[in-house]
Amino acid sequence: MSAGRRRPWPRRGAATPADAASPRRQRRHPLRRYLLGCLVISACTTATISVAAIGVVTTIASDFALGGRPLDSAYLTPAKAGAAQTILVIGDDHIGPTTTYSTGAEQTVNGYHYLHADTFMLVRMDPSQDQTSIISIPRDLLVSFSYHGHHYTDKFNSTYSIGGPDLVKKVALATLPGIAINHVIDFNFASFLGLVDAIGCVYVDVDQRYLNDSDPTYQFINIQPGYQRLCGNKALSYVRYRHTDSDFVRVARQQDFIRQAKEQLGAWGFVSKYDQLAKAFGRAVWTDIRSSTSVAQLLELAFFSLSRPVRQVPFQVENTAFPISTSAGTELTVTSTPAKIHASVDDLLYVHPKTAIPALAATTTPGHGGRHRSRRRATTTTARSNDLFALSPGARTQAVAVGVNVPFPVYLPTLQTGPAVANDFHAYTIGDEQHHLHYGYRIDWQVNGVGGYYGIEGMNWTNPPLFANPSATEAIDGRTYMFIDDGKHIHDIGWRQRGVLYWVSNTLQEDLTNIQMVDIANSAHALH
């Protein structure tokens, strides 16, 4: 249509002189209608969420009353409305009151049946901050405590076997001075499986091959590397795996699982699935949270936190293999110091870092959309100063072989970290949430002997939950990257290229620096 014939808005009748003389006034009406529409949509959305939230509170409160055991509020600090809350989350091996378990004897404490617990997390949700922070107390941390007139020097997880959640709270507060615990939630196998099922299983980027099909003292597991949907016992085996790595790696894996489940659920998923989540959560966990007021306060924080990244706070330790003598013989424990524990507590409560995309070897030039970052290819000198070296020749040959099994180009970085060894070259298929089949591949490198695997991945499912809410986007060397971080460390860097999503993933413990992550991603090119 020519410029002379174009009309800004459809007209129902002939224009009046006033209309013709006031084109700006004409243009304001659609803008007002648009803004009014936005307000109506926003109001409806808010109303929907409010009604759903009321239903959630009522349902969870009633399910708590009918389901999981009430826990004592001893050692807990009442939470104020709208304030930050710290929640102690315990993961135990208990399934039911008559359950036996091959790796531990069931105990009866105050009429309750306990096994040992292997997860102790402090989850910090602060509405004034841009992230949810999680620190895990090492299960093997050496602690001293008294219970019913007896003194113990043992691993932290013994507190659960000896005195249940109340003793865990007491020793946690003594071990981490400065922490106030507002609530406690005790998850068991059944509650975990119920929540995973309520979410609709969880899409997880698995960093390596997990296999145990021969050692009966550990749970069976057989999971290939790559992005995939984990359900039921497979998800449980994944988060509890410790056969070939340490408790610290398992803690990082559990926190990563939480992060990816949160991304998949999202705020709307939370609203749409609240009934299933309420039943799974309320009827299976043991907690002090009973009243509608407590549930409402917690839900308000949880809903707010769904749009914020999950930050892994490391528990600073001194020695990871300190021997102690027990009735079963010599056992290795984890030790810390008052100064390191104090630093860990401060990190959880007061440190709120923001991830900065590295500026090394980058120049900033003006672009059409404002400031546009353009990164130069890393030189050999720059790469080595970042502990990056040329990719080993054998990796390319194996990557070409993987490419036969996917219908798109395989991207491979030309740089790798100094100590890394190419480990797995795996092609896979995956179904999305609408049951469409997609192809993918993952190549990973091992950077240390205990759970340290980073990798590059490609998949023709371009909008998976993993990249549903990137924390930042940045154009570097003509490629637009999406960044997933925890507020301090970059965990994933992705980009879309001709209908394919590619990304570089950090290790579970985020061993690679932000600079290394950017340079490895920027060095990736299609194999020909």
Image: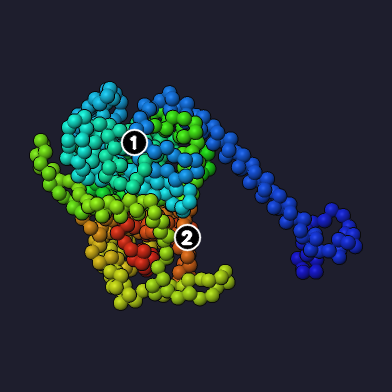
Q: Position of residue 20 (x, y in %)?
A: 86, 64
Quadrant in the picture for the N terminus: bottom right
User: From the viewer's perspective, is residue 62 above or below residue 456?
Assistant: above
Report the front residue among 408 and 207.
Answer: 207
- The residue at the point 30 percent across, 70 percent down is 386
Quarter location, residue 490 = bottom left
Quarter location, residue 63 = top left
Q: Secondary structure at mark 2?
A: strand
How far is the residue under mark 1 from the one under mark 2? Answer: 40 Å
Q: Is residue 50 visible?
A: yes
User: Of callouts 1 and 2, which one flags the residue occurring earlier in the amino acid sequence?
Assistant: 1
- The residue at the point 90 percent across, 59 percent down is 16
Colour pattern of the rendering: rainbow
**What type is the residue that disc 1 sits on?**
Tyr
Q: Position of residue 354 (x, y in %)?
A: 42, 60
Q: Position of residue 81 (x, y in %)?
A: 49, 40
Left/right of residue 67 with respect to residue 245 in the rendered view: right
- The residue at the point 26 percent across, 55 percent down is 339
- The residue at the point 34 percent across, 33 percent down is 74
Residue under pointer 1: 75
Report the front residue among 251 and 519.
Answer: 251
Q: Nearer the viewer, mark 1 or mark 2?
A: 1
Quarter location, residue 31 = bottom right
**What type is the residue that disc 2 sits on?**
Ala
Residue under pointer 2: 472
Q: Position of residue 481 (x, y in %)?
A: 45, 63
Quadrant in the picture for the C terminus: bottom left
